[in-house]
Amino acid sequence: MDFLRFVIKRLLYTIMLLIGVATCVFILSKMVPGDGVSAYLSPRSLANEEIVEAFKVRWGLDKPLIVQYGLYMKNLLLGDLGVSIRTSNPVVQELITKFPATIELATMSILLATFFGVIFGIISATKRNSLADQSLRAVSVTGVSIPSFWFAILVLYVFYYKLGWAVGTGRLSIGITPPTKITGLYVLDGLLTGNYEAMLDSLAHLILPSIVLASFTMGLITRTARASLLETLSTDYIRTAKAKGLPRAPLMYRHAMGNAAIPVLTVIGVGFGNLLGGMVLVETIFAWPGIGQLAYQSVKGLDFPMIIGVSILIAANYAIINILIDILYGVIDPRVRYNK
């Protein structure tokens, strides 16, 4: 019962958060210099008042802000984010089309970051102040410090252009037929439909951008896992277990890792939220048709409905990930349920 109450409270907080974010996004979109009229009408059309008024009526720009806000919140609750000024397609349709590419790239990146980050963190903590520890700490600092856009250009130049070990940009090579759409994830759809050529090719295209995006989060996970494990290993109950002769492996994986997991989960959740938000520069460099590119194009063209849609989607990603992480906290450590 306490756990159910804990989950319900988190859901209510999430709903309030999303309403607040939606309101802030609407206000900020109206404060941006310029407007959709000047962005999408030619100078000749702007000189014609009838064309300008017709454009404002079509996109609801003629109504007072409070009325626009009321209609916006009403449509948002109904799942209607409006129509993109730039493409004339429903915003929801555009998001559904672009989001699977970002999910696929973000998932691969966070899996790589978590796998190597946790392993590096464990090695670094168990071999404190050794050469391995110093080397892995240097790797983690490099991963956190290196600019993602520079790293993206570097790996493309070295591994694609110079060495030819990896494929280039995009989700698929030229001449490869995309798999029949089921989930929108090319690797999974290729597996489900038996289109193994597309599956392997899309997997190859994921390697370089995933490594670039994973480097930053991997560095954070490594450092967090190391610090958390070192703190846990210095506690009284661990020292007591050591004194009783408990073998190193059970001591580490049954006792230390569980208590050290919560800070690592936090970093993983935040990292995954960042990746799902779309890494604009990396997606642009790798010509990856995801949310990052969509956000860039929308801001560049002052496509207010799409800007709002992308912002709401990113906020919803963070909110959903945060509530899942909170629930995992309660599963790992029951004390969390009673303290919050």
Image (cartoon, rainbow, N blue to C red):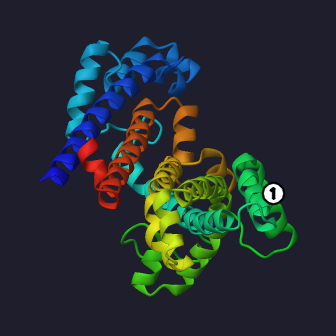
Residue 151 % position (x, y)? 76, 54
Residue 194 % position (x, y)? 44, 87
Horizontally, is 255 left or right of 320 in the view?
right
In the foreground, 209 or 307:
209
Residue 252 visible (yes or no): no
Q: Quadrant of the C terminus?
A: top left
Residue lying at 21% horizontally and 39% vertically, measured from the top left: 12
Q: What element carries label 1?
A: helix
Residue type at mark 1 is: Leu
Residue 140 picture quarter: bottom right
Residue 213 visible (yes or no): yes
Name of the residue lying farthest toward the front? 243
Residue lying at 48% horizontally and 85% vertically, measured from the top left: 195
Residue lying at 49% horizontally and 54% vertically, measured from the top left: 272
Horizontally, is 207 left or right of 37 in the view?
right
In the foreground, 193 or 152:
152
In the foreground, 327 or 262:
262
Residue 177 % position (x, y)? 53, 77
Residue 214 picture quarter: bottom right
Residue where numbered disc 1 is placed: 154
Name of the residue lying farthest toward the right? 162
Q: Residues within 10 Å of mark 1 (few under 14, many from 20)?
A: some
In the foreground, 276 or 247:
247
Residue lying at 26% horizontally and 33% vertically, measured from the top left: 16
Horizontally, is 5 left or right of 337 in the view?
left
